[in-house]
Image (cartoon, grey):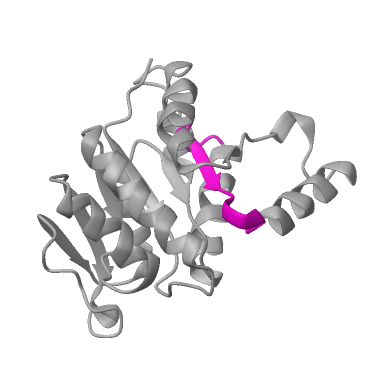
Amino acid sequence: MSTIRTVCVYCGSSPGTDPAFVGAARRLGEIMAKEHVGLVYGGGSHGLMGAVASAVLDHGGHVTGIIPEFLENREQTLRRAQEVIVTPDMHVRKQTMFDRADAFVALPGGIGTLEELVEQLTWAQLGRHKKPILILNIGGFWDPLCALLDHMRRLEFIRTDLAVTLLVAERTEDILPKLRAAAAAVSESAKTGAPATVQRL
């Protein structure tokens, strides 16, 4: 069985219009710190990104921020983090986030958040990894995505032989238990995929 030592959290650099989004981000950060699970995230200090990272730090947890050089000023790098990695571009950023994480969680966010989430689903579908992927569906934020995925399945664009598991949590408190249960079914050696598959991708 594999373990959850770090979680990569994808989320918006904006707080959104619903205060519940920021509340969920802060609560997740608090829980991660208390459970000694490190945060890997996009490195910014604004919006939900800043809320989850600040909460981890405020409660004594460890934060690794990974940000491309061209976004340092725009997203205001959170210098309080114990580790800040500045990458030359988005591709290296996403690969580094993947390498540092044992699981992935998507909070509400915009196109960037969606793109990062879908990329991990694609990699899992292609055999690149077996790390758990979860969405926190606060206020039904991810309902349209879930409906689209169901639509793709019905039309057999997501075939049963290429199915991938997307975990869904309605409450912040359920995130780590769901991730741990999923990780327990996968060995540590198997979670990053077969070497031949990884090399091809």
Question: For the point 22% across and 60% down, which residue is it?
Answer: 54
Asked if the magenta segment contains residue 139, the reply would be yes
Question: For the point 31% across and 40% down, which residue is it?
Answer: 31
| Start-end of magenta stretch | 127-141
Question: For the point 77% across and 42% down, which residue is it?
Answer: 158
Can residue 94 be seen from the camera position used here? yes
Question: For the point 39% across and 55% down, which residue is it?
Answer: 25
Q: Quadrant of residue 80?
A: bottom left
Asked if the magenta segment contains residue 114, the reply would be no
Q: Quadrant of the N terminus?
A: top left
x, y percent for residue 170: 58, 42
Left or right, 20 with reference to 41: right
Residue 171 vs residue 36, the one in the foreground: 171
x, y percent for residue 137: 59, 50
Q: Quadrant of residue 198?
A: top left
Up-down: is 103 above or below 95? Answer: above
